[in-house]
Image (spheres, rainbow, N blue to C red):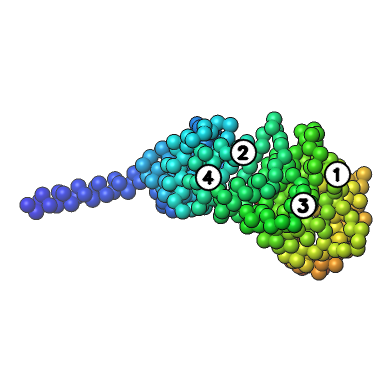
Amino acid sequence: MDAIVQQLAERRAFLEYAKHEHARFSSIVGRIPEDVLSIIFEYTIPSYLTGRGGLSQRRSSLSLNVSRVCQRWRTVALGNPKLWNKFYVNMTKVAINAVPPRFFELAARCRLHPTYLFIRSLRYSRLEQSGIPEGLSNTCKGVELFCPRVSYRSMSPILLDRWLARNLPNLVSLSLLGYHLQVIKPAQVDQPHLPAFSRLSNLNVHFVNDFDVQNFRDVDLRAVYQLRLPALRRLVLFLTPVRYRKPIDMIQLADSFPGLEELHIYSCSESNTKPSSTGRTATFSHLKVLTWVHKQCTLNQFRHAFQSLVLPSLSELTCTFTLKPAGTIDSRSVEVLEACLTRSQCLLKRMNAASAASLDSSWNRPWAERLRNAYPQLQLVNEKTYFDVNEIKAAWYH
């Protein structure tokens, strides 16, 4: 008996040794902890897949593909609601009174985690009848509406607000791509309205090209000013080449959105920012991040944008500087900006020159030194990522 026990002990020791020796041949992925594996899966979310019935789900090699690799990976993927909480709906493919069969399965995987709805070609009645808003009414925190180029059209903010208030009462982020907000009629301006808009923290309005909106006589920024959202924290205005009847009025922006913490304005158009004719200042008391980028910046546009601004809380600034023919920054735009910063008395920590010239080029080193002396923690950069609106919105849909 002792000999048999000894033989078994030796056999066990040999197997343990062999197991240890062969461990290096096993996949390191198989040894990744499940919580770490789940985080890795989240980084593969960016793209999306169009599904049947108009319903789409963000595709990554993750939520749809990686979950099929093995039982362990599927368990990890199904256990992370962030991998399933973004829904893409193409309303041209959604049948009335017919909820896509995969919708309830995907919604159940989100549990009580915030969900986000991305809608192509919005049709109010068709979307309501599909039952999709009802399934997400308590959890939906963000909506992105996209109007295809072939069907650019105007949108009534009052009708949109009624639909959002009725179907998505917990909405905090809204993005309008290719829809032109209609100007509210004077008789309606003073009436209580827009309860859904008033609850928003994040708003993105992306205007479209002028040749696509020749029939829109009422397209201008008054529709944005009229929203009057004191609780709004982040506003993105992307003004592609639309010739607005009314220029950007920084004073009206400050009056309409007094609680803004981030303001991003991107303009490729021929429009100007409106100068202050009354001597008033545009005070953004809470604004921490300002992006003002104009594709073809002129000195007048730069002066009109900054001459009335007061930004006491500003910590990060990205702006397009006026350039001289040689490609260097025009010193007159520097003077305008310095006057704005002096007037604001802010604690600037980061400034990005959204232009071809570097802030450390030889001609403006004295200015860079003045900035560093005035703001000891200031970081001067010249990055080209300022035009990535999706990167800004990514923080809204997390």
Mark carried by residue 245: 1
The front one of 9 and 390 is 390
Q: Position of residue 291 (x, y in %)?
A: 76, 53
For badge 1, the amino acid type reads Arg
- Residue occupied by mark 3: 187
Q: Earlier in the sequence, mark 1 or mark 4?
A: 4
Q: Which residue is mark 2?
A: 122
Q: Position of residue 33 (x, y in %)?
A: 41, 52
User: Are dots 4 and 2 in contact, CB under 8 Å?
Assistant: no
Q: Earlier in the sequence, mark 4 or mark 2?
A: 2
Point 51% across, 38% down: residue = 130
Is 166 left or right of 28, judged from the image as shown? right
Q: How much space separates mark 3 and mark 1, taking CA atoms?
A: 21 Å
Helix or strand or loop: what does disc 2 sit on? Answer: loop
**SS label for mark 3:** helix
Tag 1, which secondary structure?
Answer: loop
Q: Amino acid at mark 4?
A: Pro
Q: Do residues under tags 1 and 4 come within 8 Å of each other at their CB atoms?
A: no
Percent position (x, y) of residue 99?
47, 37
Q: CA distance from mark 1 to mark 4?
A: 36 Å
Residue shown at the point (83%, 51%) measured from the top left:
248
Question: Which of the two marks, 3 or 1, is nearer to us in this view?
Answer: 3
Give the spatial CA distance, label 2 vs label 1: 27 Å
Please name the residue that numbered disc 4 is placed on.
133
The amino acid sitting under disc 2 is: Leu
